[in-house]
Image (spheres, rainbow, N blue to C red):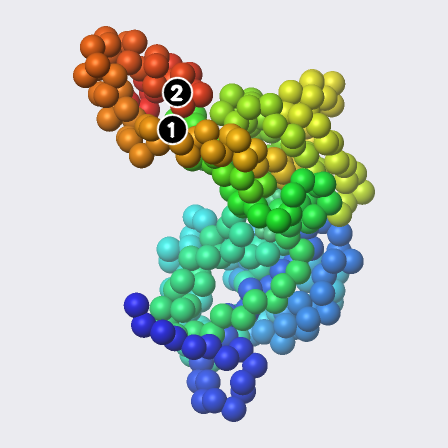
Amino acid sequence: MSLIRQSSFQEKEAVVSGSLYLVATPIGNLEDMTFRAVRILKECDIIAAEDTRQTRKLLTHFDISPSMLFSYHEHNKAASGPELIRYIIEGKNLALVSDAGLPAISDPGSDLVKLALEAGVRVIPIPGANAALTALIASGISTERFTFVGFLPRERKDIKSLLSTLKSSQGTLLFYESPHRVIKTLGFLLESLGNRRIVLARELTKRYEEWVRGSVEECLTWLESHPPIGEYVLVVDGASEEEEQKLRDAWWQELSLEDHVDRYEKEGMSRKDAMKKVAADRGVTKRDIYNSLL
Ligand code: SAM
């Protein structure tokens, strides 16, 4: 590793290349666009956007006409990223925006940041709205310490394994979720973390902004009669001190699943019983253990 210093406002140094600006855009309410974001978008030579159609609407609203609007998303980032960096090295200033909120949060922006830094390009954040922090501050759940989880993985096995690592974390947990998966995700949270306090923050800053605060079970009941629509942030209470202590004290904490099962087998249990015992220790189902050991 080598130490590299960047000065974002020091114009006297010989900066030959352009800069990469990470520009926040509103998460719904256009009034949340900042003056600085509008100015930077007007001044930049290129705007790179996740969804150019969506961004064009925003630009039109703020009377911004970019000389170049480039598409940069998950499926073209491998080719598009190096091309964008080449433009910056040639002296162009580039603004990266995502569909909503802060670029590089749950979108491929962070890959472009890495490429830029590797190429010695200045990366300058233009802060603004962000769904996770907007949900957190009004949730009523502790803001003292928190973990941003973002979207859960797709596979059940991966979801369970991630949630088991978060189970003992005392900080508030922040999840992003689409309306089609909210109910399923609450089911996973209930199964893996227990019936914790949770806040469903829906359609933040928009006309139908809504907050549902309760236990995971209460929220699941609510969703039966109010099917999920719109965008959600889930704010979930962290582990209690006792829960955290209990897990920290667990003798098997440092063992892999395989070693944990092995240990019981060595004590004379059948493989099936050992897996059952491991599932009980870890507060997950036998099927989870079985699937993880496949
Ligand atoms: N970059 C964005 C940010 O800074 O918050 C997040 C982008 S991520 C691809 C999209 C997810 O963010 C949505 O699926 C939803 O979970 C959350 N989200 C975005 N806008 C939201 C809103 N207005 N209300 C609630 N959640 C929102």
Q: Percent x, y for residue 133? A: 64, 50
Q: Is residue 148 above or below residue 57?
A: above
Within the image, what quadrant is residue 103 found in? bottom right
Q: Is residue 225 above or below residue 252?
A: above
Q: CA distance from mark 2 to mark 1?
A: 8 Å
Within the image, what quadrant is residue 238 found in? top right
Image quadrant of ligand 1?
top right
Residue drawn 52% across the image and 48% down it: 106
Q: Percent x, y for residue 171? A: 55, 42
Q: For label 2, count other residues whose C-alpha is less than 10 Å away and answer few (under 14), some (14-19) or many (20+).
A: some
Nearer to us in this view, 244 or 201: 244
Nearer to us in this view, 73 or 10: 10
Circle nearer the viewer, 2 or 1: 1
Name the residue that disc number 2 marks.
281
Name the residue that disc number 1 marks.
250
Are the residues tagged 2 and 1 within 8 Å (C-beta)? yes
Q: Give the quarter of the figure containing the N terminus.
A: bottom left
Residue drawn 54% across the image and 71% down it: 124
**Horizontal arrangement in the rendering, residue 137 relative to residue 17 (left or right):** right
Residue drawn 55% across the image and 23% down it: 194
Is residue 231 something that shows in the picture? Answer: no
Nearer to us in this view, 32 or 250: 250
Q: For label 1, count other residues whose C-alpha is less than 10 Å away and answer few (under 14), some (14-19) or many (20+).
A: few
Label ID, residue 65: none
Q: Amino acid at mark 1?
A: Ala
Judging from the image, what secondary structure is the residue with disc 2 in? Answer: helix
Judging from the image, what secondary structure is the residue with disc 1 in? Answer: loop
Q: Is residue 59 above or below residue 94?
A: above
Is residue 191 something that shows in the picture? Answer: yes
**Horizontal arrangement in the rendering, residue 45 relative to residue 260 (left or right):** right
Dot placed on the residue nearer the N-terminal end, 2 or 1: 1
